[in-house]
Amino acid sequence: MEVFLLYNLFSPYQIKGLELKNRIVMPPMCQYSVTKKDGIPNEWHYVHYVSRAIGGTGLIIIEMTDVEPDGRITDYDLGLWSDAQVPAFQRIIEGCHQHGAKVGIQIAHAGRKAEDAEIPVAPSPIPFNNDFKTPRELTTDEVKEMVEKFRQAARRAVQAGVDTIELHGAHGYLIHEFQSPLTNKRTDVYGKDLALFGREVIQAVKSEMPAHMPLILRISAVEYVENGYGIDHAIELVKQYKEAGVDLFHISSGGEGPIGSGGKPGSHAAYQVPFARKIKEACDVPVIAVGRLEEPQLANSIIANGDADLVAIGRGMLRNPNWALEASIQLRQEGVIPKQYLRGFPRVK
């Protein structure tokens, strides 16, 4: 007799050694708030993240954190290229842990989209658009050195106490640039095999992670530009990245160039969820869905219908750090509101 397990937004979730109290994820969202330009998170970041932990979020993924100074989108972004940056991250992580949230960090390099780099680097010398600088093509040896920079950043993330690491392979940043035929015109091994750089980064980062710690990779399922890749290419990438060691995939889309004749991304609620479900089914991998999912009944249905294993709430959580608490009332979930906040919320009926 077949047994169907019914899950909802507040069902616990476990993958390897990561145990979450619910299926609600705060996705990485750049704050552009490192006023000293040193890559070190400050009091803004501490309050920003810890408040979402108090607000009931199950998994908080710290914003895009870069592996070298010129890998930042702007000079006001976070970094993990130095051991001196570790303690401030450690303080944030410990603060979130005190309130029941688990914490990941998104490790990345902006590639040709590094706006404040004097000369950005990329797989090929193709600018993002006319407003961006033309990047310098990395040599083969420099690509290998970049893999090492990702490994070192992962080591520092583990030292800081993260529960998981996410690699940014979406939105037109460096890993995405290597895996896309639009932005990778190389003739060396990294051009002949579009997934090679991604696989090597995955393997390098996994070498620094405890065996029980899952690795997440964010990927753009489709590109919204003329001749951009579609879902079939993304599925092949996911299969290779799964084999290389990724445990969980965060399914987004776009970001590799100005929107052209290849199709405009949807602005309606849940427009990316079909991508998440298709990759989940085609590759037999757990996935995080993201994109206009802030209506609690909608987010809950994505879990209940099996479209995704976790749901990321971005802009909704920027507007309301207590999004998960509000959702618990709408979904009639008891025992979620902290006792200190009970007088501010109606009783579950």
Image: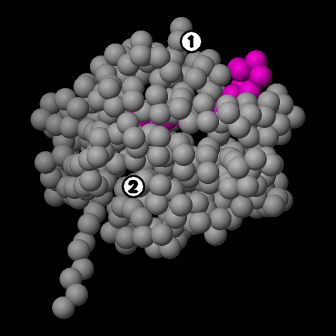
Q: Residue at x 58, y 23 (%)?
A: 68
The local crowd at label 2, few if under 14, some if 14 to 19, many if 20 or more residues have their Cα within 10 Å, is: some
Front-lying residue, 324 or 158: 158
User: Does residue 132 show up?
Assistant: no
Residue 83 place in picture, x, y as percent: 41, 16
Q: Is residue 343 above or below residue 290?
A: above
Q: Residue at x 68, y 54 (%)?
A: 194
Q: Residue at x 37, y 72 (%)?
A: 305
Label number found at residue 247:
2
Looking at the picture, the colour scheme in use is one colour
Question: Horizontally, is 204 left or right of 237 in the view?
Answer: left
Dot 1 amino acid type: Lys
Res 163 → quadrant: top left
Dot 2 amino acid type: Asp
- For label 1, the residue is 37
Q: Quadrant of the C terminus?
A: bottom left
Q: Quadrant of the N terminus?
A: bottom left
